[in-house]
Amino acid sequence: MALEILSKYDRQIIFLVVLILTFMPAFYPIGLPLPQYFLTNKVYDAINSLKPGDLVLISFDFAPGVWVELGIAMKDIMQHLFIKRARIVIIAFDPNGPALAHRVLNEIDLKGAVYGKDYVVLGYIPGFEAGMAAFVSNPKMFTVDYYGNPTADMPIMNAFNTIGDFKMYIFACYTWVDPWMRQFSGKIDIIIGVLSADIVPQVMPYINTGQLYSLIRGSRGAAEYEQLLGIKGEATAFMDAASLTVSLGVILTIVANYGYLKKKLGGRR
């Protein structure tokens, strides 16, 4: 009887169940277990080893269209940095970067950090790789920040003079990583990339040589990172929805084949 009902209303039932499984985690994240990628653990351990006051350079180098793939991961990493009370300098080599950084800062718990003292958004640096080279040669190139405030009045700007004063550099990009490697590798001890999952195989040579310390692979990596942090955020909800709908597909395949074989055999073993 159940198979007959399912075969009669299969599309309506499947669409309804998929809709429920897709939207339910957005309101009530489950936190389904995920195998931890060793590079995600490496990023977590590196940030977790930071001491209060350590300087970290961040660059938001992607567009809003890839927020789910990169933005959520940056939220989780930034939250961890504020938990560790690191001092954070934010720049961007994409014109959308400063606005995305502003969004992240508005959506996380800053743990009492004071703007200008504990963190600053310096803004967009044009010229892409040429801009990277200019910043590396003179990280104090900004006279005003993203909001138009004079940087000379900010205590955090007195904490560094050269690029080597930064303990860690974390960049998020959706394209190849060669420009970042050419300009920053060897000048900051720990370089971490927040990257789309599809380009991870291309950057493994940089990981193997140590030029890129580690990486987070898109929304999947963000979900793994949230498990390490012990939180259920956007990435957890996203992966919950993906896991539940894929599991539904497997179950439906089994049920459909069972129903087909039962009908074909007509009750015969």
Image (cartoon, grey):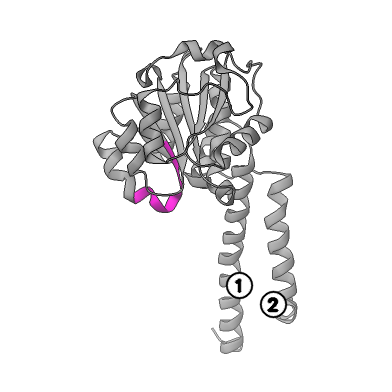
Few, some or many residues within 10 Å of mark 2 (<14, 14–19, 20+): some
Residue 136 highlighted magenta (yes or no): no
**Residue stretch in magenta:** 193-201
Residue 85 location (% of width, % of height):
55, 16
Residue 198 location (% of width, % of height):
42, 54
Label ID, residue 3: 2
Residue 79 location (% of width, % of height):
58, 28
Q: Which residue is at a point 30% across and 37% down the rendered structure image?
A: 182
Residue 59 location (% of width, % of height):
48, 33
* Residue 257 higher or lower than 34, as above or below: below
Q: Which residue is at a point 59% across and 43% down the rendered structure image?
A: 235
Please state which amino acid type lies under the numbered disc 1.
Answer: Val
Q: Where does the C terminus fall, quadrant-wise?
A: bottom right
Name the side, left or right, on which 19 lies relative to 67: right
Name the side, left or right, on which 256 lies relative to 186: right
Q: Is residue 257 visible?
A: yes
Q: Based on the displayed image, in which of its 4 quarters is residue 137 positioned?
A: top left
Alpha-carbon distance for marks 1 and 2? 8 Å
Q: Nearer the viewer, residue 237 or 52?
A: 52
CB under 8 Å between discs 1 and 2: yes
Label ID, residue 141: none
Q: Nearer the viewer, residue 10 or 88?
A: 88
Residue receiving disc 1 = 255
Q: Based on the displayed image, in which of its 4 quarters is residue 37 positioned?
A: top left
Q: Where does the N terminus fall, quadrant-wise?
A: bottom right
Few, some or many residues within 10 Å of mark 1 (<14, 14–19, 20+): some
* Residue 222 higher or lower than 105, as above or below: below
The disc, 1 or 2, on the residue closer to the chain's N-terminal end is: 2
Please state which amino acid type lies under the numbered disc 2.
Answer: Leu
Residue lying at the far left in this picture: please name it. 209
